[in-house]
Image (tube, rainbow, N blue to C red):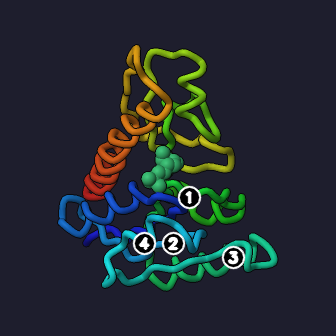
Amino acid sequence: MALNIAIFFSGNGSNMLNILKACNSGNVKAKVCLLISNNPHSNGLKQLPQKQKNVFIFDYEKHKTKKKVEEKILKKLDEKNIQLICLAGYNKILSKDFIEKWKNKILNIHPSLLPAFKGLNAQKQAYEYGVKYTGCTVHIVDEKIDNGKILGQKLVEIDKNETVNSLTKKILIQEHKLYINVLKFIINRRKYE
Ligand code: GRF
């Protein structure tokens, strides 16, 4: 049975679109049953095929509290029988309660080699620090930011003539490959559990 996944995104949505494509083509044996964005103007939303179903926008600005939004999201996850959540550029921090309910079932991708350069603008942080190599990480989400168990990483070299922009693009290419690899690994592991 295919794994039922939900993808949460906020901006460009390139990771989301890449995972969606891989699942739809059968390259990853998972079914994208739910797409959630907090941003009604997300670029990723605009790029989704017209026929794409199960897309929901939960605009935090339109809710009194985070708890209220999360209650709605939790309900949707339940309705769609979601087994795994993939955060893919989701710019909202999930509450401790939410993470506890979905313990070990939320993945995130971060554009650095964790535990280095946590938080925002990780590519810029690495560039300005002057490291020679950086990369990206897929990890399990726990109650601390960019902190949970690391499931996979990819290395990216910072060239002499690199700019933050070129570095960000290079990392993103690796992010797309990494997320797919990690999903395949998780799905494969399920077979033996
Ligand atoms: C990626 O760099 C991801 O690592 C970070 O946010 C960015 C999202 O990019 N968490 P996209 O929206 O998937 O293109």
Q: Front-most of 76 and 25?
A: 25
State the SS at label 4. helix
Find disc 1 in the rendering and name its residue.
Answer: 90
Q: Earlier in the sequence, mark 2 or mark 4?
A: 2
Bin the neighbour count of mark 3 within 10 Å (Cα to Cα): few under 14, some 14-19, many 20 and up: some
Q: Quadrant location of residue 45?
A: bottom left
Lateral position of residue 179 relative to residue 191, left or right: right
Horizontal side of residue 57 vs 134, given as left or right: right
How far apart are the two marked residues, 2 and 1, measured between alpha carbons? Answer: 9 Å
Q: Tell me if label 4 and label 3 are in contact, CB under 8 Å.
A: no
Q: Earlier in the sequence, mark 1 or mark 4?
A: 4
Q: Is mark 1 within 8 Å of ligand 1?
A: yes
Kind of element beneath mark 1? loop
Q: Nearer the viewer, mark 2 or mark 4?
A: 4
Q: N-terminal of the two: label 2 or label 3?
A: 2
The crowd level at tag 2 (other Cα within 10 Å; few <14, some 14-19, many 20+) is many
Residue 69 x, y percent position in the rendering: 69, 76
Reading the image, the residue beneath label 2 is: 36
Residue 157 sits above or below residue 176 on the image: above
- Is the residue 127 above or below the residue 118 in the image? above
Please report contact status of discs 2 and 1: CB closer than 8 Å, yes or no: yes
- Left or right: where 58 falls relative to 20: right
How far apart in space, not on screen, are marks 1 and 4 (Cα)?
Answer: 16 Å
Question: Which residue occupies 41% across, 32% down?
Answer: 166
**Which residue type does callout 3 highlight?**
Val
Q: Residue at x 57, y 50 (%)?
A: 141
